[in-house]
Amino acid sequence: MIWTEDRIGILDRLARSSLTGASYESLFADFCSSISAAGIAIDRAHFSTATLHPLINAVGITWLPGSGASRENFAHRGTDKPVWRESPFFFMLEERLSELHCPLVGSRSRTDFPVFDAFRAGGLTDWIAFLIDFGWSADHLPTGNLGMIVSWATAAPDGFSAGDIQRLRSVGPALAAAIKSRVFQDLSRDVIGAYLGADAAGKVMGGAITRGSVTDISAAIMMADIRDFTAFSETMSRVDLVALLNQTFDAAAAPIVEAGGQILKFMGDGFLAIFQAEGDRVAAVRSALAAALAVQVRLPEGVRMDIALHVGDVHYGNIGAADRLDFTVIGSAVNEAARIEALCSQIGRPVLVSDEFARLAGLDAFEALGLFSLKGLAAPRTIHAPTVPSPR
């Protein structure tokens, strides 16, 4: 009866932590403290869960009495490291075990792992883990699905009792449900952020999901494209070509983000980025110019990138088909930036800007190249180029 009452309290606290959006660390620390308070001697607890993140393969949370919970992120490449392949978690996944109990005292069996030596040195006597599937298929993961493994360890002289193990087993699914809720919350934010950009993702997560839900903003616009990309695609293998694209976009994205801009979309070998003015167009265009010049310096050897800069009012929001939306910007200013970018290779300059952009940024920083006809625009436009020496 006592455990039944304790269990109700534990699960109630867990549900409340989950509903309030508590972090992994906070949720797990509170859960472990509740388990310990119920009379189960827990001296180390850990859970790991896979995720869907461009850079992070899994998240691990370790709890120690008196120290709280700490987090570690595991990169995708870490799955090849010996420390993972020689771990009890890897063994459970390979053997498809839902439960693994390993006493840490007495004779050793085939289910003894290098990490247990550190546990024994720390005074731990018993270890048990449970694998719980989230019911979400994910083919890119080694296991083919999302789930979690939670492990419990004690320093009690006799280890865990049969009753302790049954109690830990009984609360496992509830913990998994709470962790799954957090995983999916992070997954939504991370995936949307990776594909839309941080600002657009924030708006979508905030409810801006209706087609036609747009706002008018003032922004500096950057349109970029790798020059002579066709030549690369005809001479490089698919693997090398994709690697070059990723390296180039990494080099471009960093200075854009550092300058306060965001890349809204990648389009083949190019991209569209904006720097929102937020009432100060001068600051926006200067940030965009600084980013464009920094991109030119950071490009991989042998890669040239044409960049056009313009400034204007654009429509920012959800546009597309009923069941396939794009969070982007549209408007005449975007079209003009695209037309200016097409001039870069023709003129032989890596960075070109519109007259409006140059005047806001300061004409003394540019060289006027003359009037040019832009496709779709009735009147010719004055085009400028930065006066700083070309980095290439």
Image (spheres, helix red, strand yellow):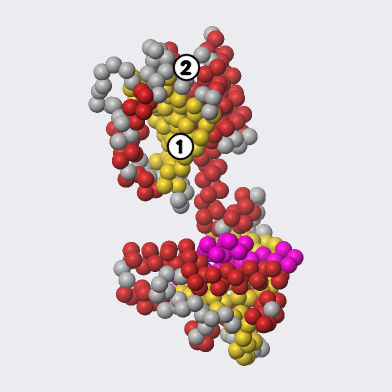
Question: Which kind of residue does numbered mark 1 sit on?
Answer: Gly
The residue tagged 1 is: 60
Instruction: Tell me: 273 left or right of 362.
Output: left
Which residue: 54% across, 44% down?
186
Percent from the top left, x then y, of residue 306? 51, 77
Can residue 141 be seen by looking at this rendering?
yes
Which residue: 42% across, 69% down?
300
Alpha carbons under labels 1 and 2: distance apart: 21 Å
Q: Quadrant of residue 373?
A: bottom right
Which residue: 30% across, 36% down?
86
Characterize the local packing of mark 2: few (<14), some (14-19) or many (20 or more) Cα atoms within 10 angstroms: some
Q: Secondary structure at mark 1?
A: strand
Task: Work out which residue is located at the far front of the displayed protein and give it.
Answer: 121
Can residue 162 be seen by looking at this rendering?
no
Q: Compared with residue 197, is residue 60 higher up or lower down, i.e. above or below? A: above
Q: Is residue 109 magenta?
A: no
The residue tagged 2 is: 41
Q: Of the residues under marks 1 and 2, which one precedes in the sequence?
A: 2
Instruction: Tell me: 315 left or right of 297.
Output: right
Question: Which kind of residue does numbered mark 2 sit on?
Answer: Ala
Percent from the top left, x then y, of residue 79? 35, 44
**Stretch in magenta:** 253-280
Q: Is residue 261 magenta?
A: yes
Q: Quadrant of residue 328?
A: bottom right
Task: Work out which residue is located at the far bottom of the displayed protein and give it.
Answer: 370
